[in-house]
Amino acid sequence: MSQDNSILCALNIKDNNIKNVSVFDSKINTNGVVKRIKLVKAELSYNLTHCPQCGENMLIKNGKRTTNQRLASFNGMEYHLILKKQRYLCRNCGSTCGAHSDLLVKNHTMTKQIKARIFDMSHESFTLSSMAKLLGISTSTVSRILYGNTKLSERSSYLPENLCFDEFRSVKNVFTFISIDAKTHHLIDLVHDRLSKTLTEHFINKYSLKERQNVKTVSIDLNANYQLIVHKIFPNAQIIVDRFHIVQLCSRALDQVRIQTLKKIDDKKSRSYKALKKDWRLFHLPEADVWTPHMLST
Ligand SMILES: [Zn+2]
C-alpha cells in the first residue's frame, strides 16, 4: 500500500482521485487563542474531457485552487484538509469548472465525513457541546448541521388520550416545551417556548375541538402555568401530577430539614452530626431497606 493510500485509509477517505497526501502538525490563532491542529495537504485531480456546459471534448487543465475543508477529528483535535483542486477551461465556450470529490459538499467547509459523524453521534445521545469538543468544531456548527434543514412538523398526526407535558433547556439555554404520548412515549409536540399564551394558541390552532375533547389525562410536573391552561385546551382532561416530581419535591424538603438540623449541632465530632452529614443517602431509602434502623438513635 502506498503512503498516500495508508494516510487516506487512516483518515477514512475513500476517494482515489485525492493524491500526494501529507500530514503536518500546525498551529492556528483564533481570537488570540493558539490551537494545535493537524494539516492534511493533498491534491484533487482527474482527467475530465467533456465540458459540463457545452459537452464538447475541448477541456484543458487550467491551474489549481486551494480550499480549506474540515475533516472529522479522531482525538478532539482539528483536522484541516488543505486541498488543491484542479481547474479546467473549455476552449470551445470559455467556461471553467473544477474537480469535485464525493467527500466534499459544494460551497461548504465541512466535509460529508464530519456531517456523517455528527449524525452518528446524535443517535448515541451525545450533547451538542460534547460532539463539538470531540470533533474539534464549534457547538453552533454542530447545531446548524443537525437542525439546519430540519423543519418541525406543524402538528402531530394524532392527539393521544393520555398526554405528558414537560420542558427542557435546549439550544442557547432556552426552555422548550415537549409533549409526548403517555402510553407509547412517542413525541407529540415540541414548541420553542413555554409561555401559556403560546402553548394555548398552539393547541387550539393546530387541533380541532373534537380532537382536544378526546384527551382524557394530562400528566404534568408541579408547574402552576400548565395547571391553568390544561382545562382551557382539553375540556375533558384530568390533571395528573407526575409521581417523579412529587418524590423529587419530598426529597428536596427532607434534605433541607436535614441540613438545617446539621447546622444547629455545635459538636462537629458528635455521632449525630457525622450520621446526618455522611449517611445522607440513608434518609432517602425506604424504611425496609435501612438495615440498621437504630444506628442514628444515639
Ligand atoms: Zn464548453
Image (cartoon, helix red, strand yellow):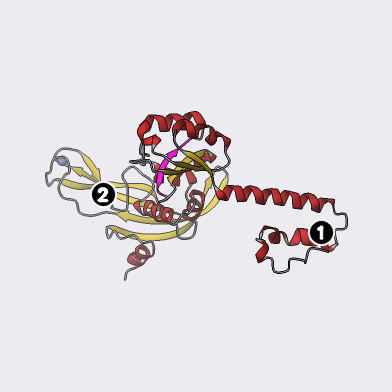
Q: Which residue matches tag 1?
A: 273
Residue at far bottom of view: 1
Asked if residue 28 is positioned above or below residue 298 in the image, the reply reads: above
Nearer the observer, 237 or 183: 237
The amino acid at mark 1 is Tyr
Write down the quadrant of residue 73 in the picture. Answer: bottom left
The reply, left or right, for residue 219 in relation to residue 119 is right
Nearer the observer, 71 or 120: 120
The amino acid at mark 2 is Ala
- Residue 203: image location, x then y, percent: 41, 33
Q: Residues within 10 Å of mark 1 (few under 14, many from 20)?
A: some
Which residue is painted at 85% across and 58% down in the image? 268
Q: Residues within 10 Å of mark 2 (few under 14, many from 20)?
A: some
Asked if residue 236 is positioned above or below residue 292 in the image, the reply reads: above
Residue 223 visible here: yes
Residue 169 visible here: no
Q: Which residues are magenta?
A: 186-193
Main secondary structure along the magenta-highlighted residues: strand
Q: Which residue matches tag 2?
A: 99
Mark 2: which secondary structure? Answer: loop
Which residue is painted at 15% across and 38% down in the image? 93
Which residue is painted at 43% across and 53% down in the image? 122
Tell me the quadrant of ligand 1. top left
The reply, left or right, for residue 246 in relation to residue 24 is right
